[in-house]
Image: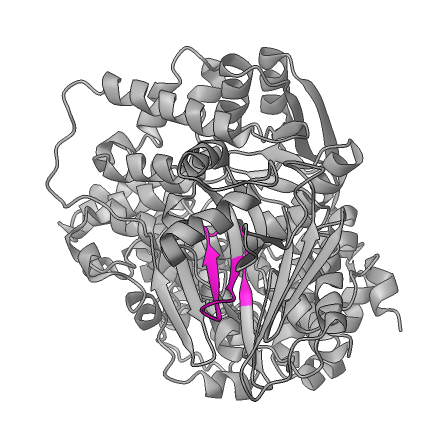
Amino acid sequence: MQDVKQAVRQFLLDNFAMGGGVTIADDTSFMEAHILDSTGFIELITYIEETFGLAVDDEEMLPENFDSLANIEGYVARKRAQAPAA
Amino acid sequence: MCGIAGILSRPRGQPPQARELSAMIGRLAHRGPDGNGIHLDGPAGLAHARLAIIDLAGGAQPLANETGSVWVTFNGEIFNFVELRADLVARGHAFRTQSDTEVIVHLYEDHGERFVEHLNGQFAIAVWDRERERLVLARDRAGIRPLFWTEAADRFLFASEAKALFALPEVPRRLDRRSLAQACTFWSALPPGTAFEGVQSLPPGHVMVVTAEGRRLERYWDWTFPSAHEAAPADDRPLADALRELLIDATRLQLRADVPVGAYLSGGLDSAIVATIVRRFTGAPLRTFSLTFEDEEFDESGFQREMVAFLGTDHTSIRCTRADIAAAFPRAVFHAEAPIVRTAPTPLMLLAGHVRAEGYKVVLTGEGADEVFGGYDIFKEAKVRRFWARSPGSASRPRILERLYPYLRHSPAAGRAFTQAFFKEGLEHANEPWFAHAPRWTTTRRIHQFFSPALRESLAGWDPYAEIAGRIPAAAAGWVPMGRDQYVEAHTLMSGYLLCSQGDRVAMAHSIEGRFPFLDHRVIEFANRLPPQLKLHGLQEKYLLKKSMAGLLPESIRARTKQPYRAPDSQSFFVAGRPVDYVADLLSPARLADAGHFDPVAVGKLVAKCAAGRAIGFADNMAFVAILSTMLLEEQFVRGGEGGKGAPACAPGLLAA
């Protein structure tokens, strides 16, 4: 089982919060902390789909699902519970 | 159009020497290849590099009045010189030439430094008044022609470009950290700051009087807007007719030249209007030029062909590739003398080279129409956000944002909730003058994360909004909100970036003078008086301007939604996943650490992302171009030891050592 939060945190540090010694806490809002802009969320969601093998529905593209590490962890867990890997 | 330079020595300073003025003006040869002139007079020295456009035989500079008591060196054009000259002759002034330059010295005799208020033109002027022993510098209202100054060794020095100041060894060459922070927020340094520590710009619409005792800076003109409560007239046709007549007159004046004048056709509305006015309402021959791109996302050649066919012009275009941009970018930065966040000036420099090779020195363009008549998305965005701010809990109001940005492949409107969250930031500041610009600046300011720890530390407490607020007149609080948005746009992006890095500098790199009918100050004043709904009508941009040209343009062009001019950014600098040689060299950890402006680890991550083709957003692309251009400036002007001695012939040659 991958550590979702750690994987996403590393993705953000490599691709968005590239400098400045930014620390991303589990509940840091990516939007409020200016870690992601709106294009950035498209990149983040693409990464999540590819890395965790799931498809994000349009109506799921909400800050409640993707605006923090904790939200993403919860979202990925819910999606996996809905469609357990074969 | 030309280059100017000069020196005023204070009592303890060395009098200017001819060799110093020659060295300074020599750095501006690209601005004025048709001849040089120097005038020495005790503590003052003026120099001029000429691009001959009006009175080819008699217009050499520096030039004096009848008695030799007033001398001028001047870059630009005085479009109303014919009328001014007739008036001056009637008042007894004796003219020796047919040049527009000569009206300046006679106007100065009559009006002192207020001469500038009589000029309709684009200019940077230095007048030496030997009787009062003072130097008067003036810059045009919109900021079309550049003028920089500094002080060193008890002398005041000025020039069209900073590289001429650096011709004197006593002038220090260091990048200015605060200006870098500004450029990586507002897209350019805010005047009087420049990319270089100690070098200042004369802001647009200002006059500066310099004497042995000191300097006095005065604003003689500024953008101003009506108060918030003016209704649009029931019938706006008379205004549309008046606007068309004014634009025709502005274009007629700007066609004044003793050499042929060309025009750019971008494929958009504004250049189409200018070209159409030349064709329909003047007797001038119409020769047009355009840029096309191999990348479909940026290319507008379909619309360009449509206008060419419609106008029946003699037209040529050049096709710009990513490799062209990579190869020419160092030279564009050398001319821009500023960190830039987009590569877009580079193709325009290449186009100017083509225009020059075709035998033209002057082109008319549509520059300024978006700022003057409300063409940019930022004005629409602000209108929607203000509407939203009146009811922040509304779910339907922000949905209007989705109608913006249809042209972007990676549209910020794609993820609705995130887009809304992005534009909701700062919604509580709806009455601040910078309200419209906050989203753009927040995105651009993401570049700051790449600054070195030392630079970030030196910027602790830096407040971009305070910088802007301090430059906005108190009266702006009573203006229509869109007027505030236009004011900020005109004083940051337009004068600081579009007219400089993307305008004068890259055109003058090839001795090409741009002329901008929409920036005739009468046009600006006319537009500024209009109720905002005649600019942005609902969400339809440039409403009255379009109406003024009804029936005169192809409907597909007239009704077209604006597509901002852009060029490929980070992707230009990578071939098969690897940075081109000079980029790899300049952005290597050792070079970055040595220069000290950026964090090598952070930049390394960005370069890797760009190399992998994953830099699709504006923020990453702006960061990459800003970092590369800053490192080029460091190389060309600070480290090079030559202080911008000569233009790099090509990228590898410059940096291969």
In the image, B443 versus B235, the foreground residue is: B235
User: Does any portion of residue B143 appear in the rendered image?
Assistant: yes
Which residue occupies 68% across, 38% down? B295
- Color theme of the render: one colour
Please state if B173 lies on the left or on the right of A74 as rendered.
right
Classify B166 as above or below B522: below
Please state if B468 lies on the left or on the right of B293 as rendered.
left
Classify B431 as above or below B310: below
Which residue occupies 56% across, 85% down? B154
What percent of the width, then of the height, locates residue B394? Answer: 16, 47
Figure quadrant of residue B337: bottom right
Please state if B133 lies on the left or on the right of B430 as rendered.
right
Figure quadrant of residue B435: bottom left
Instruction: Identify the magenta region.
Output: B126-148
Magenta stretch holds residue A40: no
What percent of the width, then of the height, locates residue B130? Answer: 52, 66
What percent of the width, then of the height, locates residue A8? Answer: 51, 70
User: Does any portion of residue A52 appear in the rendered image?
Assistant: no
In the image, A25 versus B174, the foreground residue is: B174
Magenta stretch holds residue B138: yes
Figure quadrant of residue B21: bottom right
In the image, B371 versus B166, the foreground residue is: B166
Please state if A15 lies on the left or on the right of B90 as rendered.
right
What percent of the width, then of the height, locates residue B207? Answer: 41, 61
In the image, A58 versus B222, the foreground residue is: B222
